[in-house]
Image (cartoon, rainbow, N blue to C red):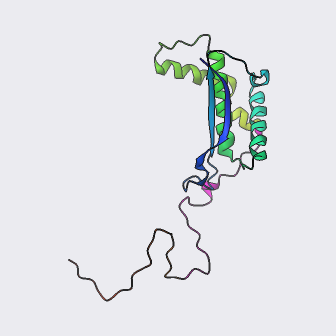
Amino acid sequence: MVCSASLPCPAEMSASIHINGTGSSIIDTVFVCRSTGVMPKKWLVVSADGVAQLVLEDLQNLRAGNVNPTQGDTRCIAYGHLVRLAIWSLRRTWNKNETITKRIAKVEEWLQDFGGWPEVENICGTPAPRIWMHRCLLSVREPKNMEPNMPKFPFESPPKKSKGPRPLC
C-alpha cells in the first residue's frame, strides 16, 4: 500500500475554544492509500522547493474556499506532503516485520535527508506571528458596556445577592 495523495481539508476544530485565534491548525489531512493506481506527476516532487510549491498551491485553494490558513495549517499541509513522499520513497525497501522503532527511524532519516519542515518553511516564507505568545489563550475580553452583575458566560448564573453572612456548616 502506498500513499498516493495527501489532501488538506477544513476540520471542525476552527470553532474550538482552545484552537480559535491561536494560529494552530484547523486543517485535517486526508491520506489516500492504494495498492495500485495513478497520481499526477507534479505530486512526485524531489526537493523541499517542490513540496513548498505544493503547499502554496494547497493554501491558495483553501483561500479560494474562504478558509484563512494559519502557520499551523501550513505546517500541517507540509507534513502531509512530506509523509506521503516518505511513504512513496520507502515503499520498495519497507519491511513491515521490522520493529516500529526501526520503521519510525527510517522515516525520520528520510525526512532529515529530504530537508523536512524547516526547509519547506524557509521556501514558503516568513512564519506567521506567534499569536499565543502575545496573549493568554484563556483570556476573555468583555464588552465595555457590560453591567457588573450580568453573567460573563452563557453557562454562568448571575451572582446571588447576599443576605448576610452564611453559616460555616
Q: Quadrant of the N terminus?
A: top right
Which residue is drawn at the image coordinates 63% and 26% (left, top)? 32
Tell me if 142 is positioned left or right of 63 in this view.
Answer: left
Q: Is residue 134 magenta?
A: yes
- In depth, the one of 155 and 107 nearer the eye is 155
**Residue 140 is one of the magenta-drawn residues:** yes
Front residue of 33 and 89: 33
Q: Which span is picked out in magenta?
A: 124-147
Can I make out residue 35 in this image?
yes
Q: How many marks?
A: 0
Looking at the picture, does residue 123 appear above or below residue 39? below
Q: Position of residue 20 (x, y in %)?
A: 60, 55
> Which residue occupies 69% across, 48% down?
70
Q: Where 71 sits versus 20, above or below?
A: above
Residue 100 screen position, x and y as percent: 47, 21
Q: Position of residue 91 (x, y in %)?
A: 61, 14
- Which residue is at the front of the view, 29 or 144? 29
Q: Does any portion of residue 117 appear in the rendered image?
A: no
Of residue 67 and residue 143, the one placed in the foreground of this image is: 67
The residue lying furthest to the bottom in this view is 164
Who's the residue at 60% across and 61% down the image?
135
Task: Please identify the quarter of the rendering in which residue 115 is found.
Answer: top right
Magenta stretch, overall SS = loop
| Quarter of the C terminus within the rendering | bottom left
Identity of the residue drawn at 67% across and 37% down? 8
Locate residue 119, reporting x and y percent: 72, 32
